[in-house]
Amino acid sequence: MSSTWQKIKEDFITPYQNDPAIKSKLELFFNYPGIWAMVHHRIANSLHNKNFKRLARVVSGISNFLTSVDIHPAAQIGRRVFIDHAIGVVIGETAIIKDDVLIYQQVTLGGVSLDNTKKRHPTIHSGVTIGAGAKVLGDIEIGENSKIGANSVVVKSVPSNSTAVGIPARVVKRGRDKSKYSHNKLPDIDKELFIYLLKKIAVLENAILKDNIHDNQEIQKQDKNLDELYKAFIDTVK
């Protein structure tokens, strides 16, 4: 139980490390449902681990009513996990969240199987940031220090120090970004593909209109450069 209270103490400190909007301790009680959802979960999880599972579900249900955050008592959540704004967050029974994870509103850590004999929910490793509205589904892993873009749907594991975006989510960036707040730097996959198609059409139009040797060589050069860019792009999203 001492470990539980230590985690709760850290939960009340995390907003000061993750949210520049907080101005006073009073706000913790009235404006941070994510904090109270975590506190309630710590208690429910402790009861669940001591085999008071029905009581744990009662505590979880009351917390859901008060905070609009649904966390199963069996979910394993590490230290200093911060659910910012929190409304609509769902964390499933077999989910595992390690330390120092930042989760925004309307995130779902859900399952894709009805087989309750297996792990059905994701494992989120330390230092991960999950953007608002993202859905991380199934028994997959999100590697350390990775970022999941807002509204992404993740159905495959994401390696450490990566950024994944889209539906379904693709890894579009590798290499650690030390800033937790970098959602504005997420690449636009659709835009990149659209620009590629426009340039490709322009090259094909030039090939039809021009027929001298010099022009053809230049067109072939442009086409080759585009193909190399396209291949590099495809490699990043596989």
Image: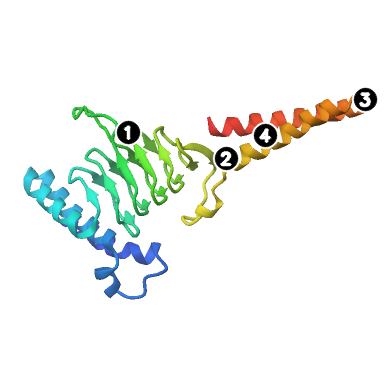
Q: Can you tell which of label 4 and label 1 is closer to the viewer?
A: 4
From what the image shows, is residue 163 above or below residue 42?
above
Q: Which residue is mark 2?
A: 190
Of 169 and 45, which appears nearest the observer?
A: 169
Residue 36 lies in quadrant: bottom left
Q: Which residue is mark 3?
A: 212
Q: Can you tell which of label 1 and label 2 is closer to the viewer?
A: 2
Number of the label disc, if any, that sits on residue 34: none
Query: Could you tell whether 37 is left or right of 156 in the image?
Result: left
Q: Earlier in the sequence, mark 3 or mark 2?
A: 2
Amino acid identity at mark 1 = Gly
Q: Which residue is mark 1?
A: 138
Question: Helix or strand or loop: what does disc 3 sit on?
Answer: loop
Q: Earlier in the sequence, mark 3 or mark 4?
A: 4
Q: Can you tell which of label 1 and label 3 is closer to the viewer?
A: 3
Amino acid identity at mark 2 = Asp
Label 2: how many Cα within 10 Å (few below 14, some 14–19, many 20+): few
Q: CA distance from mark 3 to mark 2?
A: 35 Å
Question: Helix or strand or loop: what does disc 1 sit on?
Answer: loop
Q: Which residue is mark 4?
A: 197
Q: CA distance from mark 1 to mark 3?
A: 57 Å
Q: Earlier in the sequence, mark 4 or mark 2?
A: 2
Of 95 and 138, which appears nearest the observer?
A: 138
